[in-house]
Image (cartoon, helix red, strand yellow):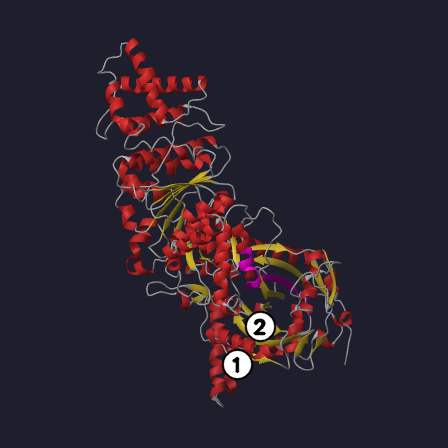
Amino acid sequence: MERRMEDMLPIMDVEHDCILSKQGDITIVFKVELPEIFTLSDQEYEAFHQSWIKALKVLPKFCVFHKQDWFLESTYKADFTKEDSSFLTRSSERFFNGRPFLDHSCYIMLTKKTIGRKTSTSLFSSLIRYSIVPQETLNFQLLEDFMDSAGQFKRIMEDSGFVKLTRLDNNALRSQSRKVGLIEQYCVLSQSPDSFVYKDLKFDKGLEVGDKHCQLFTLGDAADLPALCGSRINFDRYCSDKTKFSVGFASTLGQLLSCNHIYNQYIFIEDAQKTIQKLESKRLRLQSLSAYSRENMIARDATNDFLNEAIAQQRLPVKAHFNILAWSTDKEELKEIKNKVISALTQMDAAAKQETVGAPQIYWAGIPGNAADFPMNDTFDTFTEQAVCFLSMETSYRSSLSPVGIRLGDRQTGKPVHVDISDEPMKMGICTNRNKFILGPSGSGKSFFTNHMVRSYYEQGAHIVLVDVGHSYKGLCDMVGGYYFTYDEHNPIRFNPFYIGQGDNLDTEKKESIKTLLLALWKKDDETFNRSEYVALSNSLQLYYEKLEKNAEIFPCFNSFYEFLKEDFVPILESDKVKEKDFDVNNFLYVLRPYYKAGEFDYLLNATENLDLLKERLIVFELDNIKDHPILFPVVTIIIMEVFISKMRKLKGVRKMILIEEAWKAIAREGMAEYIRYLFKTVRKFFGEAIVVTQEVEDIISSPIVKQAIINSSDCIILLDQSKYQNKFEQIQDLLGLTDKAKALVLSVNKSNDPDKKYKEVFISLGGIISKVFRTEVSLEEYLAYTTEEPEKVKVQQYARKFGGDIKRGIAALAQEMRNQIK
C-alpha cells in the first residue's frame, strides 16, 4: 500500500529553532564537534565520560537524548582553480584527488516528551497511527524550563573542553530552496546538502530508501550487550610492549567502521522513582516464582543487584538503545557491510542482531524530532554510567583554517589536512614561540619531512636560511631557484660580506658583522684585541664605503677593501701617527693576504654572484666539506649569523625561518652556542622561528647550553619513528617533557601503516597540550624533489639536463615514466 510522505511524516512544524512533532514533542538540535580520533588519553576518555554523565543528569524526566552520527563515504576533491599554485602543489592536488575517506557529522537531539504520552512500541508507532497535539505543548513555561535544561546541558559539555555544541536554527533543520535540511537529509539518506532528489521508502523487501539498500543492526536487549564496558578500550594496532593506545569504547561502530552508516544512540530519561517502583514489583514477582525455575532466580538476583546499585550509588536508571543503519546502492555489497558491522560489534564483545520486522519503526524513530516515538520494546534498562560508554566519542581529523601551515595526511585514510604548527598555536595560547625541535634517527623520514615543511613555508612567503651537512635540500633549492652555498675543489664556497644590496644600507649591524669577520680572520680564538685596533677597523670601513660612494666603478669586495687599506688607509694612519703597538697594520695586511687576489682563499670573500642575501628567500649553506676546516668554517658561521640576523631585523612583517640540521653540533663547537641560545630566545619577537634537526638525543644532552636553549625554547616538538628507542624512551621522555599520552602516541608511529601506500608517520606536540600523529604522504613529483637517496638524486639531475637544466620538467618527465613502469 502506497502513502504520501507528507501525510505520514511525524513532524508538524519547525519554528523557534525547535522541531515540533505531531504528538506534541519538542526537540532541540545541536551540531557537535567531537575530539579527533587517536588524540585522547585514558584519563581524558574518563573525564569526557564523566562530562556526559553530568550533562545527562540535568535533563528533565520524560526527556530523550538522541545522538546521531553520520559516517558517509566521500572523496577528496582537488582544487585546481588557484592560479598561483606551484608545480608541486598542483602535483599534490592531482595525487590526492579522489582519495576516499569517511566524512563524519554529529548531532545531538534533546526531545521533551509530553507527560502522559502513551509509550510507543513496534505495534503503536506514529508510522501506523495519527495523533492530536496535547494541551501541555502549548504551555510556554514548560518550554522555557526545557530550554533552560538544554542550555545547562550545553554548558556542562562545553566546559569539559572536549566538545563544541552549535544550536541548529530553522534554516538548518528545514529544507530550503537550494539546501536540504537535516530532517529531509535523514528521510532520504542524502549524502549531500545539495541533493534534491525525492526518494521512495519501501519496507516490503527489507528497508529501502530510494536506490539505497539498508541494513539495521541493533543493541536493544541486555542479553546482547558485552559483559564489561568502559570509557575506552585498547587499540591493539597502535599498542607497543611499553604502552597501551586508547580509543573510545564504541569507536569500532563509528570512525573505525568503513562504510556508509548512521550510528544512532538513544538514552531515555524516565521518572526514576516510578522506574524503581516497577523494578521492586518485578523483583517481588520473581521472588515468588524463583522456586519454580533457575532462570527466575537469576533474573531476581539481577534485578536486586540493579536496585541496590541505583539506591546505594545514587545512579540514574535510564532506558537505552543503540543501532547502526548501514547502506549501499549495490545490493552485492550488503554481505560485506554485514560482515564489517558484525565484526565491529564482536570487537566490543557484543552480539549482533540484524533487525528485519521491527526495522521500519526503528528507522522512523530516527527522524530528527521523532525520538519520542521510539518503540520501547527495543530498549533495555541500565544506568547513565553504562549507557554513556556506548556513545561515539571521536571524529576524523580537521583541517586548520589558517593560511599558514603544511599539508599532512590524516592517520586513517591519508585524507589531506592542513596543519598550522606556527601561528594558530600562538593565537590559541598553547605556544609562546614558533621554534621547533625535530628528532628522528637515520631513515625515519626526518629530512623528507623537513623538506616538505620548508617548501610549504617558502610557498607561503617565508624567508628561509638552511644550514645543512648532507645535501638534503639541493633538489628543493634548485627547484625554487634559491642560493646554494657549498664547497668543492672545482667550485669553492664564495661570499661577499662587503656587498650592500639594493634597498639595504650600511647600518651599525652590518659594520659590526664585517668587523667581527675581520677580527676572526686576523686573531686566533685565544688572542684578544685592544680598543685602538677596534677603532682603526671602524675607521677603515667608514672611509672605505665613503670612497665607494664617490667611485661607483669600484666593486665592493674584499679585494677592493684590501687595496684601499694599502693605498689609502696606511697613509692616513701614518699622518695620524698611529703607533704599531696600537694598530699593527702591516701584520693585519700580512695575515689577511691569503684572502686577496692570488691568495690561497682569494675566492672566499670576493663573490660576484648570489650577492643579495637579504632579498633571497631561500638560502642553503651546505657545510659538509668544511665543518672541520680551521679557516673556512669560522668565516662561514659568522656569515650565516650575519645573514639571518640581518633578515630578522630588516624584513618587517615577513616570516623568517632558520633551520639548522646536524650542522648545529659543529656550530656549537665553534663557540656559536651563545648565538644559538640568543636566536632561540629572541627570534619570536621578529616574526621568526628557529628549528634544529638532530638524529641522536645524546648530541643535545652533551651540550648543556644548547640543551637548555633549544629544548626549553621550542614549544613545538616533532618526532619521527622512535621504535628503536622504545626500551629506553624514558630518557627522551624526561628530556623533552613528554606526557604518558604523548609517549603512547610516539611509540605508535608507523605501527600499522597501509602496505599499499608509501608514507611515514610523524608525531607533533604543540606546547605539550595538543599531540597528534600525521602521515607525511606526498605525490611522486614531491618525492623526487625531496629525496635524499643518491641514485634517485642523480636520476633527477640527468632528466633535468635533458630539459636544459629545468628541474620541474625533469621531475615531471621522470615521474610520468615511473608511473608508466608501475602500470
Residue 132, x across and y down, in percent: 77, 69
Range shown magenta? 92-116
Residue 244, x across and y down, in percent: 38, 64
- Tell me the element at label 1: helix
The answer to whether residue 778 shows anywhere in this view is no
Measure the alpha-carbon separation of dots 1 and 2.
36 Å
Write the residue at 68% across / 65% down. Answer: 185
Q: Are marks 1 and 2 in contact (CB under 8 Å)?
A: no
Q: Which amino acid is tagged 2?
A: Ile
Write the residue at 48% across / 45% down. Answer: 480
In this view of the protein, which residue sits in the foreground, 524 or 552?
A: 552
Q: Is residue 328 magenta?
A: no
The answer to whether residue 777 shows anywhere in this view is yes
- Observer-side mark, 1 or 2, equals 2
In this view of the protein, which residue sits in the foreground, 443 or 260?
A: 443
Query: For residue 522, what is the image quadrant?
Result: top left
Write the residue at 63% across / 62% down. Answer: 110
Residue tagged 2: 324
Tag of residue 284: 1
Q: Is residue 10 left or right of residue 740?
A: right
